[in-house]
């Protein structure tokens, strides 16, 4: 039996166009959603990059501040090294007034100071070949000593002995050595004239 077609000829074409339009609409929706997702991810990436950039900028600022502080510390260290070098070359400063005050404290009341000579001696310090290399560099090349020679008179030998003992007890007086005791007549009284020599270490304490 022959089938009869009641639909017009243009109807199948219309249905195909509708399907195409629906597919295009869905494709457009998917495209819009994809673009929206891409824009969202792009903005999120931009925000993350901005946070990273701000963190790097803050670290860079801190690093620059640390470098400036390091430069200041380096300059201060160089200044201290220069002062240390000057002190090492000149030795410790010993005022003559302080030396005389120290002598006055240990002198007996009856003792009279006749003469005093103060001189600075410098000698090349011998290098210890067995010492480590670092300690060799730290050793000052010169050995500096302040030599003091004084001549005085005292009533008795006991006074002279007490004065020598007091000199020996002074911490910064080294190598206290008498250089002879001779009798001396002063206004009809017999005195003891003597000479003493000692040294003061001018090297920087280590």
Image (cartoon, helix red, strand yellow):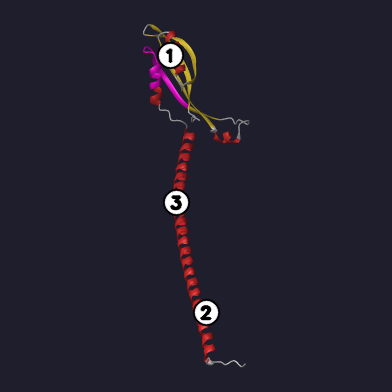
Q: Which of the two marks, 1 or 3, is nearer to us in this view?
A: 3
Task: Give the label on residue 35, or none.
Answer: none
Q: Nearer the viewer, mark 3 or mark 2?
A: 2
SS for callout 1: helix
Q: What's drawn in magenta, residue-wise? A: 101-119
Q: Which residue is mark 2?
A: 23
Q: Residue at x 48, y 23 (%)?
A: 199
**Which image quadrant: the N terminus?**
bottom right
Q: Which residue is mark 3?
A: 62
Task: Check if residue 116 falls in the magenta segment.
Answer: yes
Residue 147 location (% of width, % of height)? 48, 24
In the image shown, does 36 or 203 lie closer to the viewer? 36
Pick whichever of labels 1 and 3 is earlier in the sequence.
3
Q: Left of 132 or right of it: where is 83? A: left
Task: Name above or below for residue 58 compared with residue 205.
Answer: below
> Which numbered mark, 2 or 1, is in the foreground of this view?
2
Q: Is residue 71 above or below residue 8?
A: above
What number of labels is visible? 3
First in sequence, mark 2 or 1: give its number.
Answer: 2
Report x, y in % for residue 112.
38, 15
Residues at marks 1 and 3, CA–CA distance in whole angstroms: 65 Å
First of labels 3, 2 by sequence position = 2
Magenta span has 16? no
**Could you say where residue 183 lies in the image, as x and y percent from the top left?**
44, 9
Location of residue 3 by image quarter: bottom right
**Residue shown at the point (44%, 43%) measured from the top left:** 76
Asked which secondary structure carries label 3, the reply is: helix
Residue 90 x/y as whole percent = 47, 33
Where is mark 1, residue-wise? 163
26 or 81: nearer the viewer: 26
With 69 as the anchor, is 128 left or right in this view?
A: right
């Amino acid at each position: 039996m022959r089938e009869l077609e009641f639909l017009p000829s243009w109807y199948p074409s219309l249905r195909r166009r509708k399907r195409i339009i629906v597919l295009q609409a869905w494709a457009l929706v998917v495209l819009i959603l994809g673009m929206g997702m891409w824009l969202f991810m792009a903005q999120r990436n931009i925000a993350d990059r901005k946070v990273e950039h701000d963190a790097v900028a803050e670290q860079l600022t801190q690093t620059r501040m640390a470098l400036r502080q390091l430069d200041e510390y380096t300059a201060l260290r160089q200044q201290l090294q220069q002062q240390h070098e000057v002190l090492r070359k000149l030795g410790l400063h010993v005022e003559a007034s302080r030396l005389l005050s120290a002598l006055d404290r240990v002198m007996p009341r009856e003792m009279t100071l006749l003469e005093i000579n103060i001189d600075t001696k410098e000698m090349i310090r011998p290098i210890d070949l067995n010492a480590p290399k670092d300690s060799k560099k730290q050793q000052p090349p010169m050995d500096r000593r302040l030599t003091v020679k004084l001549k005085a008179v005292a009533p008795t030998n006991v006074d002279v002995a007490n004065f020598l003992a007091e000199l020996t007890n002074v911490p910064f007086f080294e190598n206290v050595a008498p250089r002879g005791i001779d009798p001396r007549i002063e206004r009809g009284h017999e005195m003891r004239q003597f000479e003493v020599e000692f040294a003061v270490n001018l090297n920087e304490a280590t």
